[in-house]
């Protein structure tokens, strides 16, 4: 690889590290060419970018960004390294777990992962990473909690309707309404007494 090619790879990696806040560092050394191709295809289908690069170039790209959060990744840069970039913090972990199960294999191995600002080191962190809540999942849970009281009220009203009952508010309104008194005919006003005739003057 020429110096120009190395520079090009470093710049590409810097762009990916800056673009994604989540990436996984995996060891794919024992995988066959066919298995690597299959893994790439699965990643593509799940919107995960997979890049294989030399460890020295990966480290140079990370160091050039000047961010201390990457320091915990350096020790994982050994053997053959495949990087997985994703907007989802857990999608690469799910892919790795499913790939292992389908191929009855322990590969690829998770060497490290950066999720936001936190570094997860070692293959023993894989299960925990598959259980991370995504942003959409967290939003869905919050919405569900907010909707829960309204759902209970609606459910109670539907139960009353199904049972042939009147809604409680309507029942109380009917019970509270006073009965109207029957109309009574108006009493006739008493007639004024007839005026006495005054005798005419003679």
Image (cartoon, grey):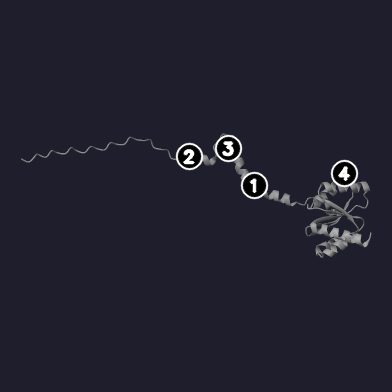
Quarter of the view holding residue 80? bottom right
Are discs 4 and 3 less than 8 Å apart at CB?
no
Query: Taking 170 as reference, is 93 above or below it?
Result: below
CA gap between label 3 and label 2 equals 17 Å
Which of the two labelled residues, at mark 2 and mark 4, occupies the earlier sequence position? 4
Going 64% across and 47% down the picture, which residue do you hit?
A: 147
Which of the two labelled residues, at mark 1 and mark 3, occupies the earlier sequence position? 1
CA gap between label 1 and label 2 equals 31 Å
Residue 85 placement, left or right of 201 = right
Are discs 3 and 2 less than 8 Å apart at CB?
no
Are discs 2 and 4 less than 8 Å apart at CB?
no
Mark 1, residue position: 147
Q: Secondary structure at mark 2?
A: helix
Q: How far from the left and from the top, in percent, is residue 13?
A: 85, 58
Going 72% across and 51% down the picture, which residue do you hit?
A: 138
Which of the two labelled residues, at mark 3 and mark 2, occupies the earlier sequence position? 3
Mark 4, residue position: 102
Which of the two labelled residues, at mark 4 and mark 1, occupies the earlier sequence position? 4
Mark 3, residue position: 160
Q: Secondary structure at mark 1?
A: helix
Mark 2, residue position: 175
Answer yes or no: is residue 56 visible: no
Going 50% across and 41% down the picture, which residue do you hit?
A: 172
Report the number of numbered marks.
Answer: 4
Which of the two labelled residues, at mark 4 and mark 3, occupies the earlier sequence position? 4
């Amino acid at each position: 690889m020429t110096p120009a090619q190395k520079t090009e790879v470093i710049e590409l990696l810097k762009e990916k590290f800056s673009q994604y806040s989540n990436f996984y560092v995996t060891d794919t050394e024992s995988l066959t060419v066919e298995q690597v191709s299959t893994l790439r295809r699965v990643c593509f289908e799940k919107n995960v970018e997979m890049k294989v690069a030399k460890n020295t170039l990966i480290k140079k790209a990370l160091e050039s960004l000047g961010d201390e959060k990457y320091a915990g990744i350096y020790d994982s840069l050994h053997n053959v390294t495949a990087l997985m970039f994703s907007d989802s913090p857990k999608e690469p972990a799910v892919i790795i777990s499913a790939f292992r199960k389908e191929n009855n294999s322990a590969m690829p191995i998770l060497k490290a992962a950066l999720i936001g600002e936190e570094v997860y080191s070692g293959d023993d962190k894989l299960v925990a990473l598959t259980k991370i809540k995504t942003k959409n999942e967290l939003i869905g849970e919050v919405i569900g909690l907010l909707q829960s009281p309204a759902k209970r009220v609606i459910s109670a009203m539907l139960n009353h309707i199904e049972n042939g009952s009147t809604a409680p508010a309507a029942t109380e309104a009917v019970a509270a309404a006073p009965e109207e008194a029957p109309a009574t005919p108006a009493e006739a006003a008493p007639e004024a007494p007839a005026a006495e005739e005054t005798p005419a003057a003679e």
